[in-house]
Each structure stands twice: as C-alpha cells, then as structure tokens.
Amino acid sequence: MAAVKKDIIGKLQEQILNLQGVKPGRNAHAIDFGLGIISNAFPGNVFPLAALHEFLATNLEDAAASGGFISILLSTLMKKNGVCLWISTQRKIFPPSLINFGLSPERIIFIDLQKEKDVLWASEEALKCESLAAVVTELDEISFAQSRRLQLVIEKSRVTAFVIRKNAEKLSSTLAAARWRISAMPSGAIDGLPGLGFARWHVELLKVKNGIPGSWIIEYAAGVFKPVKEVPVNDLKIRKAV
Amino acid sequence: MMQKRYMSIWFSTLLTDWIRIKQPALRDLSLVFSDKAGNRMVITAASKEATLLGIHLGMPLADARAIAPDLEVIENQCHKSKKLLAALGRWCIRYTPLVAVEEDQGLILDISGCAHLWGGEREYLREIVNRLRGLGYQVRAAISDTMGTAWAVSRYGRVSPIIKSGEELNALLPLPPMALRISPMASQKLIKLGLKTIGSFISMPRSVLRRRIGEGSMERIEQVLGQKEEFFSPITVPEVYSERLASMEPIRTRKGIEIAIEKLLSQLCASMQRDGVGLRSGLLQSYRIDGRVIKTRIGTNSPSINTSHLFKLFSLQIDNIEPKMGIELFTMDAVSFDELDPGQETLWITEKSMGNQKVIELLDRLAGKLGAQVIQRYLPQPHHWPERSIKKVDSITEPLSLPWRTDRLRPVQLLKVPEPVQVTAPIPDYPPMLFRYQGITHQVKKADGPERIEREWWLEEGEHRDYYQLEDAEGKRYWLFRSGHYSSEKASKWFIHGFFA
C-alpha cells in the first residue's frame, strides 16, 4: 500500500515539474556527482546541468571551501576530457592544489582580468561555447538582469556555469538554479590520530529552483563524498546570523 | 614582363618646409639649417628665400650671416631629414606598395601597374604632387622607365614630367651632366671641357668617356639609360600575403569598415588556403585622408583561415578605428602565418570534432578584446618552492611533461605574497597555539607539520620555510610558515600563505 502511494506521489511530482517547465528529458544524460542525499533536494533528484549555480563566499576561507567543492563537481563534469574556463579578477586559486580534488589543473584555462566589468563579458562569451565542460566565474556582484543574460546563453549552449559571489553583502536575487554556501567544519580525527582529518564541509543549499533547500555536513575523502549528517534547516537561520 | 615605371619625387626644400609646417610663424623668412662640419658651422639646408639671396649649401654660416644679417638659423636638426623622408615614404604607400628613400631629399616609387587606378599617369602624378603641396612641401616629380631618368627629370627637367617608354635619351639630352647622378668631380670636369649638356657627350665612344669620368660614373650613365639594372630597396617589404582595398569615396561608417574588412579577409584567406597556411597574426592598416594610418592587430591561438572567426576578432576592435574625415585605403597583411594542420589533434579530444576549434576561437575572441595576457594556463615545474612549482605556458596544447604532485596537500587559495601574522607557539618547532590574522584571533585546534621547504640557493638567497597546516575552532584551515630557524634571541617571523578547502 505504502509503495503504491509513493508511486502515485512520485508521478504527481513529475507532473508538477512538467507544468513548471522542468523537462525530465533534458537531463536524460544525468551525471552522478556522488552527492548522495544532497541530490534529493534537486528537481527529479538530478543535479541540474546546463544551469547557473551560485556560491556565496565572502571570505577567503569560504572561497577556498567553495573552490574545493566546485573542483570536485568539475572533475566529474570533465571526465570526458573537457576543458573549463576559470574567469576572475585577483585570482588566488592555486592550480596544483586542485589535483587533490580529482581535477587536472592543466585542463583549466584561467582568464585573469583587471576590471570587474570584463568578467561578465568574458563569462557570457565563454558560456556561448558549447565545447566547454563548464565555466567558473568569480565576481563581486551579479544583478538579476545580468544573471538572466547568462541564463539565456546557457539555454542555448547547455554549458554549466558556477558563479562564486565574493560580495554577498548585497545579495540580489538571480536566476540561478541553485544557491550554495560551502563553509568549513571541524574535521574528525582519522582513526583517533592527531592532526588534520579529511576536509569536512557544511553544505547549505539556500535556494533550489523547483527543489527543496537543505543543509548537510559532508566529508571528502579518497575522491568521494561521505555524508556525515543532515542538519535541520532551522539551524540555517542561526548560522546566517553569525 | 611588365614594363617597369618609376616615379621620382624631389623635395627641394624638405627641412625648411617641414619646420614651416610646424611653426607657421617662420613663413616668408629667410631660413637656413646649419650643422657642425669640423670646426665650423655650415649651411645644410636653405629655404627658397635664402637661396635667392645667394646662400648655398655648404657655405659657412658666418658668411651667410654676412650676406643676410636677419637670417633665421636652426641648428643641429639635419638628422631629421632621413626620418622625415621615411615618414613621407610611408605616406606614399597609399599610392603604391613599393616606396624607396633616395639620398638627397627624394623618394622613388615603383608605380608599375598602379597609375591606371587614378586614371592614368598624368592624373596620378598630379594627385600626388598636389597632395604633397597641400601638406606644405615644395615638390617636383617625374615618371619614367628608369629610376635615373625620373630622378634627372624631376630635378632638372624643364618640359614634361612624364617620359614615355623609350624616350629617356631624348629627355636627357638638354639636361646638365649633374642630372646623371655622377660625382660632382666628374660633372665639373665635363663642364670645364665645355660639355654642358648630356647631349654633347652621351654619344661619345664609351672608352673615351670612361677615361674622362671614371668607372663609377659610367655605371650611373648605363643605369639612367636602362642598360644596367638598378637596385631598388623599398622601405617596407610587402608581406607575402597582403591585400589592398582602395575606396572611391572616403569611408566614414562602421558598416563601411566592416565591408572592407570582410572583403580583404576573404581575399587574404583564399590566397592563404591555396598555400595551405593559416593566419596567426594579422595587421589591418586604415589610411585616413588626413595622413594618419591606424593600425589594428589581431592574433590567433592557432592558424586560421576561417573568415567569419577572423572577422569577429577584427570587429572587436572596430571601435578603435576613428575614421574622422574618412578612410581612403585599407591594407591587410598576414604578419605571421603557420601551416594549417587539417585535423589538429590536441590534448582535449571532445566528442564533438569541432570542439577544440571552438575553444580556440573563443580564446582568440577573449584575447582580441582583453589582451593575450589574460589567458593563463599552468603546468607543473620541478621545484618545491610553492611560487615556483608551476609555470605559465603560452600554448594551450602543450602537454604535461611531468605529473602533478599529489603527495603534498596544497592550499586552494594561495596569497601572491605571504602576509605576516602574529603567532603564539609553545615550544620550538611545535605548531602554533593561536595566531592573529587581519584582527581576528584563531585558536588552533588541529595541526600538521612542519613541512620544511628549502630555498633553492642556486636561484636566490634567503631563509627556508617551515610550513604548518592549521585548523581553527571553526574548522577553517590555513597554511602558515615560520621563516628560518627558531631562535631564542629574536622572535620568529610567521606568515600566512594560503587557505585550504
């Protein structure tokens, strides 16, 4: 009986998504990012490709965590020998570190710009190129109109965009499919030994289009995500205040 | 072979005209240029007014001042004439691609096959002379089959400036011996002998003449008559792949410039395709009516003959082409080109076969608008020192020559320059207990290290670094190092260098 109910609910959800304009067929070649329970937050339980993903990173520590998290996603996206562009001003990303997230640094082309306004132009141009696996953009602010421009380009080229917003003070709404915040958490000891454990992150999905926001603590060890626990969404507000 | 035609342009008062264009106040004054020759100042250039007073080149300045006390003298500027002629030569490229600078204030243009574009040699000559006079230069020009005859007629001719093929000798007959470009000694000797026109001695037996004026002068005579080839060294050697587009009406609109670029590109690419080469860097020169030449350069990351792609690269820079009064000529050169690799295999073979080409074209567009230096790609270098562990590579296809190191964890965010931090460390060589960075105190909960990285003494001097990976109470991870050994006498210097994910 319960199984039948679940089936009916699932079908109804699919219908709702269809009405909302999310076509399951689009993600027919869905890629498993190994995100485990986090995937359940997305519409159709599939990580949205060919979409804009925002990451909030106001300080260098968060930027580092976001950089690591994005690198892991990129490594999956670039498995088929893809190329990716990393567009930024005052870039601090240290390429050799990315190999630890399964990403080949020589396959990233960094576009280091002087002016903030060139970043958006370059990102738009890059997103037009369907041969890229993904485009990562670090910028201070992005307005709704600017995000729509990128979204329109993405819909044509089907390239996935990751936008790291360095100035989350003035948080304008955007057309992003998901808004993330990745921050560091104290690591657990490995086999009770002293020293640093595996990287552990607090992954917050603050907004998901047609999905359910959530918050999790995950660990990245030996090339795979390991869910540690799910944090109730109520905790989110407390962290936001901090 | 097509009959060669040359045009010689003589600037009789080049330097004085030039200074008058720059300083109109000097107009109508007797003006001379003087330079040091040995111990005295001599006249090196004189305006028409000064010449009429009896001042001639090579005259000591003191003598000239005696003749004309109110003489305007400009000193030590004579070296300018060469530069000036070269600039005027470049200006003339709008009329022919082959322009050479002559000694003695002149230009020589190889105009073979050019004049008909202006409606004939007479119109062509008139156009150039009028334009140069309009700029403020006194010029005389002549067209002939040989450079020597054109030279002679432009300087000494009295009748017609255009000498038809085969009539060189007739044109030369009434001219003085100096018109043959022979040495002053030789020409003076001829005049002393009463041979005041070329006609009076040119039909003499060669052997007799050679004895009088020497071998060098004989060669000059043969060149003038077209019996001996004369060497022509143009100021700019035309590129192998070069296209020109002259416009009937000056072009002032963006659309016009776009059409011109498209036309030139399709011609250029067609000729390059025939030879199996592709453009690596191109130069578009727009010749404006007011004499300025606007240069627009593009570069590609791999040889290309894709006109629409190349057009996009140029179109990014059209804004920088200011037409002002209008553009009368466009030239496009393939400054560098490479062999086209039909099926270019690169590092990244994507499912789509055109994949790489598209990425390369994207990078070309970015480089075209933002400069090639914005594109960075890194490969590992065999160095432990973090700043030297990677190298920038220009090529996006250069393969990995040695693997990336995975045995040491490196921070995701690395500061370009390590920043000093205040640190409390309990005992020597132990990781810090707390550190203060940008006004915030971080309690260190977990730590790994030290990892000692020695400075490469053969490259630079300085202290080694002892790196620690630190995790604070919130779980944020940092890369700190102590510079040099721990010492009890003075406080150790600590720096923050990076942030781990």
Image: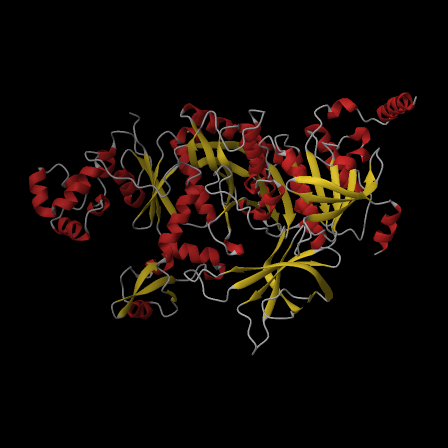
| For residue B129, above or below residue B27 | above
Q: Nearer the viewer, residue B455 or B128?
A: B455
Q: Nearer the viewer, residue B485 or B186?
A: B485
Q: Nearer the viewer, residue B224 or A26?
A: A26
Q: Is residue B132 visible?
A: yes
Residue farthest bottom in this picture: B489
Q: Is residue B168 left or right of residue B447?
A: left
| For residue B288, above or below residue B303 | below
Q: Position of residue B215 (x, y in %)?
A: 12, 44
Tell me, what colour scheme is on the image?
secondary structure
Q: Nearer the viewer, residue A140 or B406?
A: B406
Residue at left 36%, top 62%? Answer: B32
Q: Quadrant of the C terminus of chain A?
A: bottom right
Q: Is residue A120 visible?
A: no
Q: Is residue A212 left or right of residue A221?
A: right
Q: Position of residue A176 (x, y in %)?
A: 78, 38
Residue farthest front in this picture: A192
| For residue A25, above or below residue A236 | above
Q: Position of residue B251 (x, y in %)?
A: 57, 35
Residue at left 43%, top 58%? Answer: B19
